Image: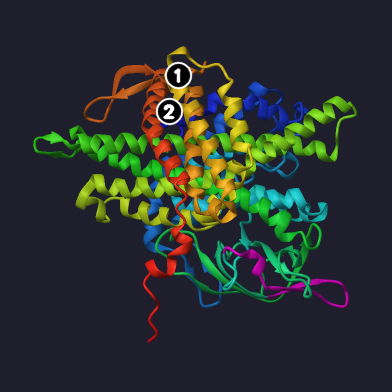
């Protein structure tokens, strides 16, 4: 029997490494909910038991039930019926039923709505596990951010109307944002929201590329102010799928076939305003999309882990020239890099999730600050710190994890050679599924633009300084020196970028963000290699099977940190030099370098 939680030593390690007890204390507000709700933990230890029990349950469900159906889901896809309804692939429908019965569709919602009230850290782990089973299923399971948005911004009446059903898995939802002429630029949204004489709201117009647009509950970004262009003319609305909501088509996509992507026509559809007018994009959708970007990070991790496992197993069993191909240096090197890249992504995902959890906790004190002025000031500063950090790490996470998943799935096919190109193995499906992750919820280019502001404003430097001041294992001194050197190089690169203006900042965005990620992960890996959490893990033999020999996870993390930091130190130097050479030919010679458009 497969369990995608218990078979992953890195997830189990990170669950123990991060201070989940602190998150539990924050979320449970001193565990006061235990008196009112049977599902609420009475203390931190009980909360941790609940977290891990759910992860084990989802791991079992993903390994034994979801993963075996994924291939059929990909081949069957979704169907647009003659009556305008949408039918999921059989496997997706069965998966959703199992997830609802497992009571995990209200992962982060409060107890009072039937939710689990779990932190984002644990939810991100669950998203990875489910995505490893079926990448396309995550696009429905991972839309729980819709419930979070309703809980954060909607009226109590709307919360009561929808959130119980979300937690029970009775309904699914959709983020209805994109239009034919408004993709990444959501300020260009033109779907009309208007009121009748009785002050009731209605929606009219078209939305496109809507993930799970056939869901029962739709959060819709629409133009409520006919006299205002741009983001300030937009508000957020909620409506039910009904006779005035028409699915006009399901997109024929490269991958994630189990997730219907719909074009929707709203024909004067009744709806309700969420929160306040004119805050739809700037406040509500930005919060919704940040949660979604974290979800794509988890989805990317799942597809990468699934692809790596296939490559690792194949390399251990496939023999060429009389030996298993994993003994060939080129293949062995590729597999090590794939494994470390996955651990980089998972570390960044978990660190970001932890920071987001802390930011959400301290945001509560903006509304209800403590009476003690000193404490109020401290909480205010903590909120600002975690908010800035979350704003930088969230797009970094989405950018890195999605790009990494494409690299790993591509390399997985390469390890299998011709077999990887065939449908006999899941590599080709995983590569098709991974491709969308760098595109939806904001392309990699947009994530870099969002990240670079945090890097160049000092947020990255403050975070690196804070991590540099921690105590680490003495064996890592040489690695810490390399990281300190890299931080100095980053600061010089940032200073040069600032001297050359915002256009040059955007031009060098990917390079400086890559430097910041490498340094942040370097310190986080050193922290993991200095951890008090010292699990023993099984070591694979030359045939890929777990042997009786075990090593310390702390020792293994030291190996990972050493390879990662020493390999990236020259890369940081090279990127810094490239930034400081001041090459602006992209601006000056574009027309000469790019072939001209020839009119027919």
Q: Residue at x 40, y 78 (%)?
A: 597
- Quadrant placement of the N terminus: top left
Numbered badge on residue 9: 2
Residue 203: say if magenta: yes
Q: Which residues are magenta?
A: 184-204
**491 displayed left or right of 72:** right
Q: Tell me which corner region of the image, top left, top right, bottom left or bottom right, holds residue 319.
A: top left
Image coordinates of residue 417 in percent, x first then y, are: 21, 49
Q: List the residue tagged with mark 1.
A: 535
Image coordinates of residue 86 in percent, x first then y, are: 53, 68
Q: Nearer the viewer, residue 113 or 425?
A: 425
Task: Kindly indicate whether the residue at mark 1 contacts the one at mark 2 (C-beta within 8 angstroms).
Answer: yes
Image coordinates of residue 6 in percent, x first then y, are: 44, 30
Residue 8: say if magenta: no
Image coordinates of residue 294 in percent, x first then y, are: 57, 45
**414 displayed left or right of 5:** left
Q: Is residue 484 visible?
A: yes
User: Element under label 1?
Assistant: loop
Near mark 1 (Cα within 10 A), the count class, few <14, some 14-19 or many ≥20, is: some
User: Element under label 2?
Assistant: helix
Question: Marks 2 and 1, how far apart in space?
Answer: 9 Å
Q: Residue at x 55, y 16 (%)?
A: 471
Picture layout, residue 548 above or below residue 232: above
């Amino acid at each position: 029997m497969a369990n995608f939680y218990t078979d992953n030593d890195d997830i189990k390690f990170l669950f123990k490494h991060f201070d989940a007890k602190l998150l539990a204390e924050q979320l449970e507000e001193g565990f006061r909910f235990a008196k009112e709700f049977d599902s609420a933990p009475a203390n931190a230890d009980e909360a941790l038991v609940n977290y891990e029990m759910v992860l084990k349950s989802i791991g079992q469900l993903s390994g034994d039930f979801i993963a075996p159906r994924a291939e059929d889901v990909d081949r069957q896809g979704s169907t647009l019926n003659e009556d305008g309804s949408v039918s999921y692939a059989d496997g997706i429908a069965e998966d959703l039923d199992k997830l609802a019965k497992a009571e995990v569709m209200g992962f982060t919602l409060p107890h009072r709505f039937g939710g689990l009230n779990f932190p984002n850290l644990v939810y991100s782990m669950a998203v990875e596990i489910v995505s490893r089973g079926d990448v396309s299923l995550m696009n429905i399971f991972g839309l729980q951010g819709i419930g979070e948005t309703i809980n954060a911004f909607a009226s109590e009446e709307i919360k009561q109307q929808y959130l119980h059903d979300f937690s029970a898995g009775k309904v699914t939802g959709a983020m209805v944002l994109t239009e034919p002429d408004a993709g990444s630029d959501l300020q260009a949204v033109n779907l009309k929201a208007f009121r009748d004489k009785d002050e009731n709201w209605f929606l009219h117009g078209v939305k496109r590329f809507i993930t799970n647009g056939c869901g029962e509950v739709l959060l819709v970004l629409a133009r409520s102010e006919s006299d205002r262009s741009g983001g300030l003319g937009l508000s957020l609305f909620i409506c039910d799928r009904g006779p005035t909501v028409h699915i006009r088509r399901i997109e024929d996509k490269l991958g994630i076939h189990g997730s219907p992507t719909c074009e929707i026509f709203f024909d004067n559809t009744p709806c309700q305003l969420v929160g306040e007018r004119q805050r739809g994009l700037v406040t509500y959708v930005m919060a919704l999309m940040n949660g979604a970007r974290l979800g794509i990070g988890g989805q990317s991790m799942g597809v990468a882990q699934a692809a790596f496992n296939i490559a690792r197993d194949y390399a251990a069993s496939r023999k060429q020239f009389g030996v298993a191909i994993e003994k060939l240096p080129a293949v062995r090197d590729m597999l090590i890099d794939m494994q470390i890249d996955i651990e980089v992504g998972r570390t960044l995902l978990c660190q970001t999730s932890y920071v987001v959890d802390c930011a959400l906790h301290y945001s509560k004190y903006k509304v209800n600050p403590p009476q003690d002025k000193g404490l109020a000031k401290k909480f205010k500063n903590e909120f600002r710190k975690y908010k800035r950090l979350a704003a930088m790490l969230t797009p970094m996470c989405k950018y890195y994890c999605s790009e990494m998943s494409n690299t790993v799935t591509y390399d997985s096919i390469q390890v299998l050679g011709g077999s990887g190109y065939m449908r006999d193995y899941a590599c080709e499906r995983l590569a098709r599924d991974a491709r969308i992750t760098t595109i939806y919820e904001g392309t990699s280019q947009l994530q870099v633009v969002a990240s670079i502001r945090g890097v160049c404003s000092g947020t990255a430097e403050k975070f690196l300084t804070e991590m540099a001041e921690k105590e680490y294992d003495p064996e890592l001194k040489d690695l810490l020196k390399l990281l300190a050197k890299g931080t100095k190089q980053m600061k010089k690169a940032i200073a040069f970028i600032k001297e050359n203006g915002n256009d040059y900042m955007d031009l060098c965005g990917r390079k400086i963000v890559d430097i910041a990620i490498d340094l942040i992960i370097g310190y986080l890996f050193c922290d993991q290699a200095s951890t008090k959490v010292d699990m023993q893990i099984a070591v694979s033999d030359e045939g890929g099977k777990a042997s009786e020999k075990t090593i310390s996870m702390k020792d293994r993390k030291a190996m990972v940190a050493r390879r990662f930091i020493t390999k990236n130190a020259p890369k940081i130097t090279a990127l810094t030099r490239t930034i400081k050479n001041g090459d602006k030919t992209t601006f000056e010679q574009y027309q000469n370098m790019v072939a001209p458009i020839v009119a027919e």
